Amino acid sequence: MHPLIKDAKNRMDKTIEALRSELAKVRTGKATTALLDGIRVDYYGSITPLNQVGNVTVLDVHTLSITPWDKSLVPIIEKAILEANIGFNPISDGTNIKIPVPPLTEERRRDFVKLVKKFGEDSKVAIRNIRRDVNEHLKREEKDKKMSEDERKIAENEVQKLTDQHIKLIDEILKHKETEIMEV
């Protein structure tokens, strides 16, 4: 396999992983710790991810629980969750924080599906940009006499196959996430 094609595959795989990571943060009506991944807490002057200042767990389908390692962080964590503006109202008992995850309305579900489709489209654009970039490099190599025209065409076909595989995978991931969101 040509090094440029190997690089393209790695970059496309990273694009898929980034998409999966983004989609994990989108609410589906079920509680998941990924919903709190983007929240940062001021931990003694340094901004720290929430999962590094306490234990984040799923109590049941509609409840998340946070047990901070330092009890003085409870009000700071509550404030960070409210400021994140993700639609959660944390409830504290002084040592633990419970976060009820309200069920989604039909309208909200449709908004999330639109958001998921936007993430998917952005990922497809990224995949196509990788293809274009690699094809330009292949043409440059042909021009610099590092490969023949036939070798370039074979390599471009390989890149196109990779592109098609990754776009198909994105469509499957989106379809699964959309089904998950619309499930009541």
Image: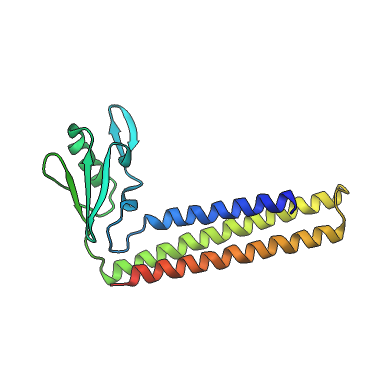
Nearer to me, 55 or 125: 55
Tally of numbered discs: 0
Lateral position of residue 35 relative to residue 7, left or right: left
Asked if residue 64 is positioned above or below residue 153 in the image, the reply reads above
The quadrant where residue 135 appears: bottom right
Residue farthest toward the top in the current orientation of the protein: 45
**Residue 117 x %, y %:** 45, 65
Coordinates of residue 137 in the picture (x, y in percent): 75, 50
User: In this picture, is 159 found above or below 85?
Assistant: below
Colour mode? Answer: rainbow
Residue at x-position 75% and y-position 60%: 156
Identify which residue is drawn at 28% across, 50% down: 85
Q: Does 89 sit left or right of 173 as displayed?
A: left
| Percent of width and height locating residue 88 | 23, 53
Where's the C terminus, which quadrant?
A: bottom left
Residue under the point 32% across and 72% down: 183
Give the percent coordinates (x, y) of residue 73. 21, 34
Does residue 127 appear left or right of residue 156 in this picture? left
Residue 83 quadrant: top left
Side of 31 relative to 22 (left or right): left
Picture quarter containing residue 181?
A: bottom left
Give whichever of 33, 47 is nearer the camera.
33
Quadrant location of the N terminus in the rendered image: bottom right
